[in-house]
Image (cartoon, grey):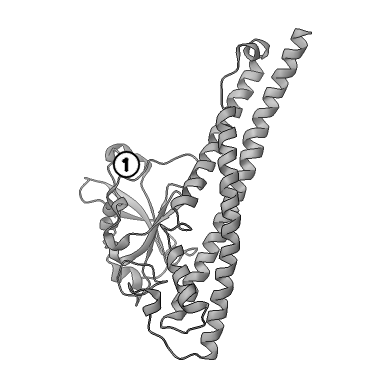
Amino acid sequence: MPFSDFQQRSASQNWEQVPLPWIPGGYLWAWFKPSHAPGDVIVRVPDELRPRLGGSLTMRQVLAALEFSPAEIQFWSLQGVVLDPQAGQNPLLDQLLPAPVPWADSAITIRPLPLGIPSTGVAPSVVTTQPASNLKAVPMTAAAEGMLSAMDADWNAILQMEAQLAQLRKQLNTAQGRLQAMNRDFTPDERQAADSNDVKNWQDARRFLRDAAGHTSRYIREHDVGVTSAAGQRNRFEDLYKTRIAPRQAFEGMATVQHELEAYRKQVQAFLAKMQTALSNAGTNGEQRAQQVLSRVSAKMRRSRN
């Protein structure tokens, strides 16, 4: 679907097949403008197609199948990581898409540029490649003052959440170390004291330990290289805040910037909730579950010695 056709089409409630011309009979599933994300395209690789692909599909090929240019999208996200196409220069566009993992959604979300925004390959929060200080100034009005105040509040809320994210990142790193240390085989003494139920429960506990460690690793990685990092949109918003928002200087395209900054704040808020959930699950589903099994086996060991 060409970019112009996508912008004109209405929201869809159905998945559609998108052919992969270079693979006979190959296709992707695409959902254009779903009701819960009317500005996006959601793409899935059919499970039955993965063996034929042999892990050879790239993001640039996905965009080509959709008839999108990398310069026509704001970003794409996969397994919780949001990536900027950088006007088609991002080398990740040509890397093979990762294999699906059990704890992550395998769908690819693509956000095309809004209608009327030039296809510069950057997010619409910065509608020009010029530094924020070079954005064209406009006269201050009551409406502009209101938008600047709203953006100021959003940015300060983001800074507070960033401090929480940094602390959670440290806690997740510590939790990951504990999870990995606990994921071990029974010692000889533990094997001798354990019965068949203990062995089964320990196998289940180790599976939860691995899942919890996978979640912590995922969110640590997303914190370091995702949308809230310097690799995402953060530095652009910080530049805008320092040069335009804090000094209360009205500028061209403020409505777009306000919308994007508000959306970014919600992204940070959602990511904060995910990190908190991952930390909680690491403790309850991971460490506590494993510790309960080990405690029962340790008690049997003590009784055996006595």
The answer to whether one can see residue 44 in this image is yes
Q: In this view, does 135 lie to the left or right of 212?
A: left
Is residue 166 shown above or below 266?
above
The answer to whether one can see residue 68 in this image is no
Q: Residue at x 56, y 83 (%)?
A: 146
x%, y% of residue 183? Answer: 56, 27
x%, y% of residue 33? Answer: 41, 65
| Quarter occupied by residue 197 | top right
Q: State the SS at label 1.
A: helix
x%, y% of residue 36? Answer: 50, 63
Q: Which one is in front, 306 or 210? A: 306
Residue that extends furthest to the right in the rendered view of this protein: 306
Q: Which one is in front, 148 or 74? A: 148
Q: Which residue is drawn at 43% across and 47% down?
A: 106
Q: Which one is in front, 63 or 295? A: 295
Q: Is the C terminus in the top left, top right, bottom left or bottom right quadrant?
A: top right
Is residue 170 shown above or below 38?
above
**What residue is disc 1 on?**
49
Q: Residue at x 33, y 74 (%)?
A: 130
The residue under label 1 is which amino acid type?
Leu
x%, y% of residue 101? Answer: 45, 40
